[in-house]
Amino acid sequence: MFVTPAYGQETAPAVEGGDAHATSGAQAGTEVPHDAAHEGTFPPFDPATFSSQILWLAITFGLFYLFLKRVVMPRLADILDTRSSRITQDLDQAAKLKDEADAAVAAYEQELAEAKAGANAIGQQARDAAKAEAETARKKVEANLEKKLAEAEVRITSIKSSAMKDVGAIAESTATAIVEQLVGKADKAGVAAAVKSIAG
Amino acid sequence: MATADKVDPIHQFHISKIVPIEIGGYDLSFTNSSLFMVATVVVASLFLYLATSGRHLIPSRWQSSAEMTYEFVGSMLKDSAGSQGMRFFPFVFSLFMFVLTANLLGLFPYFFTVTSHIIVTFALSILVIGIVVFYGLAKHGFGFFKLFVPSGVPLVLMPLVVAIEVVSFLSRPVSLSVRLFANMLAGHITLKVFAGFVVSLSALGAVGIAGAILPLIMAVALTALELLVAALQAYVFAILTCMYLNDALHPGH
């Protein structure tokens, strides 16, 4: 549809100028072909075409402007607005989710810290209790040992005193026996007095 | 004979009437230029309409390209004219899309390039400057004329500076329109000349065909260059529009 009129325009002057250029052949390349209406005018500067071009430019450009302003541009603005609002919405949601995640992490860490502190307290308590128990057991054992020691000491003292009591008699008899062996006859009372004075 | 006409590099800018209309002595015919204006609008509208019809949250390639164009023009306008400039966003966006699509459509063989006619680019420039002047006057009243009086200039130099500013302001629509028009015109002529060499050389037999390889390579390279120029000139047109609109919004230098 677009090509046909333009092509027609290419071939039409060929018929008109046919006689003039019939002999010039290929050399006619640079010559301006003669148009019946505007001879020799450079087409873009031909004022005869101005009014029609201005009118059709005004009509086509005006319609184009209205179409873009009323239909295309609101639609494009709408598409871009929807997209940017969707992006902001998604970003907001992402930020909200991140906040939630951060709060969950903080809560978890707090709970962990509390649990650690609780565990420490329980451990300390157990350690203290065990220490106290050990202490009482030790004290009990010590007290027991001391009692036994005291008893043993008492017995030792009694045994010692009773032994000391026997020592005098044994010394007398021994001394008597020694004296009899030496002298033949012993004065028991004298021996006793001598032993007593030595033991004194 | 047909070869001779195809080689003519100016022929592609001819305007031919498709539906002759004449009202009050003015020729308002529906021409091949009008047809390609309609085609430009239809192609650009269909692209933007169909690409965004899915309204996907995750865009398809088509939707992504429409969004990128939209955001590209939007940020361009915001950077040069501030957030107040966003009221002109529909205008700048349609201007950019129209010029870009017209430039790109013109690169197809046998297609007419709407922007290769000075009257079209000039009309668009006048529209831009008209909006700048009317909006500037409506918003700032006489304060708009501060545009021509830069601050911090010695009083002695003031008349000269104001004169320069006025001339530079008046030359804006001319430079804006001529830049786009001349780029399109020159590019298409060059392209056609090199393509014409290929055609006329290859008509000369085996040697000609061998010689035609060089202009063919040139034509391919120029097509790539013209693709760049088509996009670049649409961008330049749009960004200059943004800067001029900034003057209407903030006249003080």
Image (cartoon, rainbow, N blue to C red):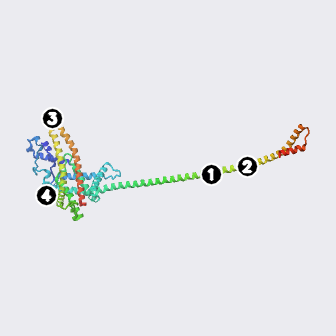
Image mark 4: chain: B
Which residue corresponds to mark 3? B207
Asked which secondary structure carries label 2, the reply is: helix
Q: Check disc 2: other Cα within 10 Å, few if <14, some if 14-19, many if 20+.
A: few
Instruction: Judge by depth and name the residue closer to the eye, A2 or B202.
Output: B202
Q: What residue type is labelled 4?
A: Tyr
Q: How far apart are marks 3 and 1 (CA)?
A: 115 Å
- Disc 2, disc 4: CB below 8 Å? no
The subunit letter for the residue under badge 2 reads: A
Instruction: Using the rendered image of the protein, determine whether residue B112 is visible from the camera's viewpoint.
Output: no
Question: Which residue corresponds to the image point at 53% horizontal and 52% vertical from the top-left?
Answer: A113
B252 up-or-down from A128: above or below: below
**Mark 2 or 1: the one toward you:** 2
Asked if the residue at tag 1 contacts the one at tag 3, i.e. Cβ–Cβ closer than 8 Å, the answer is no
The amino acid type found where label 3 is placed reads: Val
Instruction: Please state the horizontal and vertical placement of residue A115, each as a whole percent of the image.
Output: 55, 52
Front-lying residue, A174 or B155: A174
Q: Which residue is drawn at 67% across and 50% down?
A: A135
* Numbered tag placed on residue A128 in the rendering: 1
Residue that badge 2 annotates = A146
Co-location on one chain, circles 4 and 1: no
- Nearest to viewer (mark 4 / mark 1): 1
Q: Mark 4 points at which residue?
A: B26
What kind of residue is marked 1?
Asp
Which amino acid type corresponds to the residue marked 2 in the rendered image? Glu
- Pointer 1: residues within 10 angstroms few (<14), some, or many (20+)? few
Q: Position of residue B220 (x, y in %)?
A: 21, 42
Direction right: furthest residue: A185
